Image (cartoon, rainbow, N blue to C red):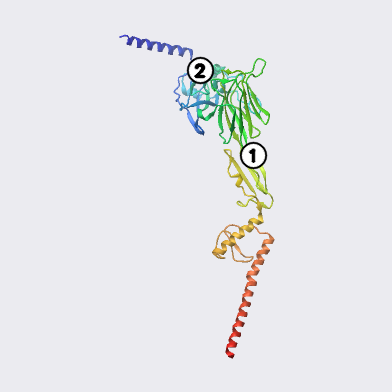
Amino acid sequence: MAWPAATTLTSLLMLLLMTIADSFSPRIIATTQAPFGRILKAVKLPGGYMEVVQEQRCSHGLLRLTCRSFRAFIFILEAEYHANHTEFCQKESKNLKGELKMWTDKGSTRKRTDMQELKGNYILDDDIQTDIIDIRSSLNKRCSGQKHCRYNVTIEHPGAHSWVPGEILLKYACIPEVAVKRYCNQQVKVISEDGGYLNTPGYPLYYIGETCGWTFRTFNGQKIVLTFHDLNIRGPDADGNCMDIVRVRDSGSTLFEFCGTAAGVRVVSYSNVLTLDFVASKKFYNARGFLLQYQVLGCPEVLAPNGSYVSNGTLTSRTFLCKSGSVFPDSRERKRTLECRNGKWNETATKLPNCVATSAVIVKSENEHNHLASISGDNILGTGVRIGRGEDAVASGSVSPVMDSAQSAMMKQADYVVDVVLPTVLIALLFVGNAIIVYIIFQFRKR
């Protein structure tokens, strides 16, 4: 008979806890956020499909990041706070209108918090608007490597409690665990533009104290891009010296060297070989390590066909130009441009034809026309087939190439043989034949 009393007591305790939580978290707004955001695309990887999700939420609301597959985990692609966009907060809660008005009346614009940006060839642009803040560092700490998580920017991002309610623009990915390389000392072949993903052993819970190395290779003419979506290792000591370090090298030159926490760092190689070293001094350290994406930039090197040279070459296209007086035989044009798409040329580079002289193309065209005429008759209409003989001959269909003086003389000589010499020989043969016949008849009459 004590069950009803126990149930009532439990309900009262739950109500008391909810009241206490609400009093301590006045800024957290209950939202009707869907369990999954808008899925932008699904990327096919060796271990399955990676889903890219995008959401737009109020900065003073609770964000819930969730992967639909239990065999996938989250990593952050973009996470920005926009102070001037308040419409999302107004939609989610009417209680924020008074708070928004208070910020407007004060004339307050949120000051940008101090953020240490990496400098150099591999960093993000430092010219960022003061009303936009990158919050990936705190979001990575809370959610990267997890299957699902909850995040409130006003509590978990430094200094965010004084921000005016604004928009959170979030883009994250759910990647299958089997699609991520997680072992040290590997040779990695980078082929497609999408590339692949790699993290340190133990990510995101810890990393072990050993020297890990990876060598990335692709084809000649291509470059390799490493993007550190989440980088969190032990920072420098009091003297500014790194105890654990991430180092990227290309042909002996150091492109990137870092210790501490960063997100979105992009390193581009100069050649087709790139080495990555991670050196940790302690056997075990309670930090996430790193998660990165490796990609290929550009297309493999392609040699210019014989008789041509490269007139314009970039990472996305290559233009070949035949030397003066020669063309590509299939298109009959001097210029040919290849487009680079997803790490591959739009044409097979090994099958590009060599440039040939313009006269050779004309002779080949005339031979094809003569062959058609011998099959179908001299006066049959067809594309590019000559009608009639001599200088007054016309062409039906496409315009024939312009002939030089030597070829014109050859054509006139051929027409002279056909129109004069052959009829003369035939008439002479007829006279001789008739004379022989008359002689034979006279001989028979004499007998």
Q: Quadrant of residue 293?
A: top right
Q: Secondary structure at mark 2?
A: helix
Residue shown at 60%/81% (left/top)?
434
Foreground disc of the pair 1, 2: 1
Kindly identify which numbered label has been placed on residue 99. Answer: 2
Q: Quadrant of residue 446?
A: bottom right
Q: Disc 1 or 2, which lies upstream in sequence? A: 2
Say left or right for 51 vs 221. left
Residue shown at 64%/16% (left/top)?
237
* Residue type, mark 2 in image: Glu
Say left or right for 6 vs 431. left
x%, y% of residue 39? Answer: 48, 30
* Residue type, mark 1 in image: Thr
x%, y% of residue 436? Answer: 61, 82
Query: Which image quadrant: the N terminus?
Result: top left
Instruction: Give the residue at mark 1.
Output: 314
Query: Which image quadrant: the C terminus?
Result: bottom right
Comparing 284 with 302, the one in front is 284
Instruction: State whether residue 401 is above or below residue 130.
Output: below
